[in-house]
Amino acid sequence: MKKLFTLLAIALLGVSAWSCSYDDDDLWKAVDDLDSRMEAMEQAMKSANTDIDALRKLVDALQNNVTVTSVVKNNDGYTITFSNGETATITNGKNGIDAPAISVKKDGDGLYYWTLDGDFILVDGEKIKAQGEDGAPGQNAVSPKLRINTETKEWEMSIDNGTTWTSMGVRAEGTDGDSMFESVDTVSNPGMAVFTLADGGKLEIPMQGALNLAISAKRGIFVYDETQTFTIESKGVERMTWTKPDGWKVSVEGNVLTVVAPAKANSYAETEGVIALIGMAGNSSCMAELTVSAADTHSYTITFEGSDWAEWVACNYNPGKYSTTQLGSPDDYAWVDETTQLTTGRPTGFMNGWGYPWFVCSYNSNSLDQGKYGGYLYDLYVYNPDGTEDSMTGGGCNGSDNFLTTFGYLDLDFPYGDGRPILKFADGKARTVKSIHVNSTCYFYSVAMSGNGLSPALTKDVTYYATGYDADDKEIKTITMTFATPEAVTKEWTKWDLSELGEIVSLRLNQAGGADNGYGYSLPAYYAVDDITVEW
């Protein structure tokens, strides 16, 4: 149409020039302006429909966990390449023609719909889907098409692939031009391509190579034949597979991982192992692991080892880490074992509300030097006769590195405050603490053997008390063990069977007896505990 108009105009000019002589500059200028205007409108329509196509592909990528493999800036805008091989182009929007504010927005049902000026576009009272359903890109979805009516100079939209057109009430006029995209950002949020729309909305799509896959737990403790479910979190994963121990059943539906333990009668099944989920997108992959085991009862031993415990390891002299030498104890020190929900409590009725939590520690020494280990500044050290004088490795049960230490007691003769250290289950559910391992700290051992300015040396037995409580903090039962005598102090990790307590929600330890300086129990009431076995 544009070329036809131009040829006709030139023909008319030719006739006029043959008939008479006059200045035709204005006519040629008008033709050039109209020609330029037609080119601008054609470019505006092309850019608008290109942006709509890009929006649809971005929404499809979100729906189907397709990642972005590259974002390349060019003279006209950006070229987006997806992991499924598709590409999309985003225009700069500098065409000199005002375009309608077409965009997409997620509704309450979690689906994206097309919008105009921020409002959902309605056809026969129904919103227009910008995404497919059931993982099928474009299925049951519509991509609007735009054009400029050359007679009315208004933008028109078709939702039936160009069969019918409806005016949008927007004149194809302007000076700056518009794009449906405000910006494209692959820097601010590493691993994500962020597309900000002209109406302020954002679409965030993972970049390939930044795949993420996680399972809601690191460990699953099963009884035989038991079924458990776990939540999966993923970004950018397009497809998934897995490996599992022999005899175990695994299935994935949506974001739910279902695991079934083998039957006890299956002699070929593995009773423990690792389930590995492998997520893939294009040529990239990522993995998440779940350690599983099956037995007659749910049982797990907390060893306080591994990366999950690293942030909780206390330090005597580093002010950037937790320490019992701080005034009181830090309020934010509250570790929780993921598998059993065991956590540390804080006694509140001791020394003006100071209550020590159970600290994760690794200090150990073979020295009982009073000048060093006989005071509270070295209260985190466990006695390790087979170790070195000052070490942070090998001091735990069975040669591990980490263990627990704390301070506190209830003086049975002068009960002025209950400072007994507390272990409890964070979810409030009762479980059986089947056993713990106990040992002496260097501070306790040194004073028990040699005394100090506050306490004479050990003159009678030191008894340990373990008391279990229910959800209402009502005492269930107490059991005891002899921890130290004037002739022998516990100096190695010793297993203490607590199964007689039965199912409990919390556990308090105490020590009594020993030396008395005239003001009650005078030995340093420090504890070292490791390898706590819980059953449920």
Image (tube, rainbow, N blue to C red):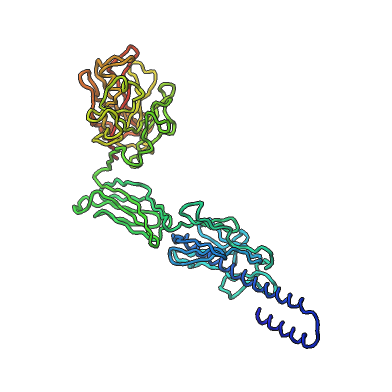
Q: Is residue 78 visible?
A: yes
Q: Quadrant of residue 305?
A: top left
Check the picture and name the quadrant holding the N terminus.
bottom right
Return the x and y of residue 46 as percentages of the image width and height: 59, 70
Nearest to the observer: residue 133 or residue 80: 80
Q: Quadrant of residue 323?
A: top left
Picture residue at 65% right of the left edge, 64% below the top? 177
Picture residue at 47% right of the left edge, 59% below the top? 62
Return the x and y of residue 253 as percentages of the image width and height: 38, 57
Whether residue 167 is situated above or below residue 257 in the rendered picture: below
How many marks are shown on the rendered structure? 0
Picture residue at 36% right of the left edge, 29% below the top? 422
Whether residue 226 is situated above or below residue 56 in the rendered picture: above
**In the figure, is residue 200 to the left or right of 518?**
right
Return the x and y of residue 315 as percentages of the image width and height: 37, 31
Q: Is residue 55 visible?
A: no
Nearest to the observer: residue 269 or residue 385: 385
Return the x and y of residue 359 as percentages of the image width and height: 36, 31
**In the figure, is residue 430 to the left or right of 76?**
left
Check the picture and name the quadrant holding the C terminus.
top left
Whether residue 458 is situated above or below residue 252 in the rendered picture: above
Nearest to the observer: residue 76 or residue 229: 76
Nearest to the observer: residue 443 or residue 36: 36
Q: Residue furthest top?
A: 518
Q: Quadrant of residue 489?
A: top left
Whether residue 1 is situated above or below residue 88 in the rendered picture: below
**In the figure, is residue 93 to the left or right of 476?**
right
